[in-house]
Amino acid sequence: MDVRDRSSASGGASRDDSGQSLRIAVQMDPIESVDIEGDSTFVLMLEAERRGHRLYHYQVRDLWLDSGRLRVVARPVSVRRSKGDHFTLGPAEIVDLETMDVVLMRQDPPFDMQYITATHLLERIHPRTLVVNDPAGVRNAPEKLLVMDFPDLMPPTMITSSREAIARFREEHGDIIVKPLFGNGGTGVFRLRPDDENLGSLLDWHFSLSRDPLMIQRYEPAVRRGDKRIILIDGEPMGIFNRIPVAGDARSNMHAGGRVAACEMTERDREICARIGPTLARRGLLFAGIDVIGEYLTEINVTSPTGLQQVARFAGVHLEATIWDRIEAKIAAMR
């Protein structure tokens, strides 16, 4: 592969100070696999291109740190809403990420050591190059841990690798949900009723494959009415939709077949957002999605939150435009 080396340019020399065009690197999964009808990264890229910004695509495996410079093999990219023909990639280039104005950290979990290492690498260029979300904020706030800062907003919840602690929690609460601490998309999530005899087998299976702890929560019957996703931008609630589990499945995740529906924000939803919003903004978590079941907050998603297209479909609100308004304002303030 012929790779052009453009990594020697200084950070300031490559920037367009007119404010009309930004150089944006998108760290994401293979663009070929994007679902253009549901993916939030795709509409963020569409909106950036509509504004005249220049986009580059790369995968996290293509990052490297060399003599204090963070470089990557990236390719210019153009996107369009055309199924089966939604992108065009230019020739590969070696890019110094400090020559970018913005890096969107949008690869999907699992939140493993590769993900954590990427946050350490990107932290070296932020905020000279604005990384969204803030890589230190992402590293310190995986979805099932940051939420534990707000125990009074949550159902009874435990994080542990202790079989004894899990047994005691189940004895107290009966009907429980067991899920991997660093999982995503509903994978590995199980509901265990009080008479279910599979807990021991499930723990054997999990700990034979992973040393990661589990999250254990009391099962909330309100999930049958849906698991709401609320989008917050800079800590402000901007959009909401509902995800309703299919019959016979306790998981409401869209990846697990959950049906998406319109819904309205309740007073309790607003109370939850008012409590957690300042924390999200302070940590540089510009784009976040929280999950609410009934009266309870269950997760705060900051690694690669989704939901922009669903909000647009049900409310006619294009939050990708709001996100770019905030990013452009932050760039202008830094300059």
Image (cartoon, grey):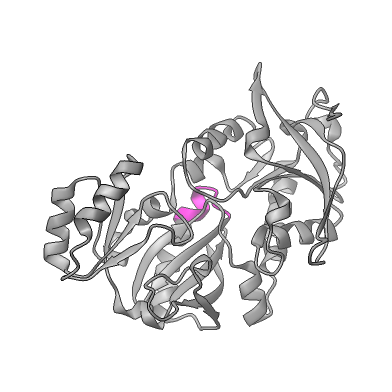
Q: Which residues, given as a range, are shown in magenta?
A: 279-286
Q: Position of residue 93 (x, y in %)?
A: 82, 32
- Furthest residue to the top? 67
At x 51%, y 63%, the residue is 289
Q: Is 75 included in the stretch rendered in magenta?
A: no
Q: Position of residue 31 (x, y in %)?
A: 72, 52
Query: What is the quadrant of residue 199 in the picture?
Result: bottom left
Q: Is residue 77 left or right of residue 72?
A: right
Nearest to the observer: residue 155 or residue 30 = 30
| Total labels drawn | 0
Query: Does residue 167 appear in the picture of this structure?
Result: yes
At x 14%, y 56%, the residue is 167
Q: Position of residue 291 (x, y in %)?
A: 44, 67
Nearest to the observer: residue 298 or residue 285 = 298
Q: Is residue 106 left or right of residue 98?
A: left
Q: Position of residue 222 (x, y in %)?
A: 34, 80
At x 39%, y 74%, the residue is 249
Q: Is residue 317 left or right of residue 307?
A: right
Residue 209 drawn above or below residue 263: above
Query: What is the quadrant of residue 144 in the picture?
Result: bottom left
| Image quadrant containing the C terminus | top right
Q: Is 281 included in the stretch rendered in magenta?
A: yes
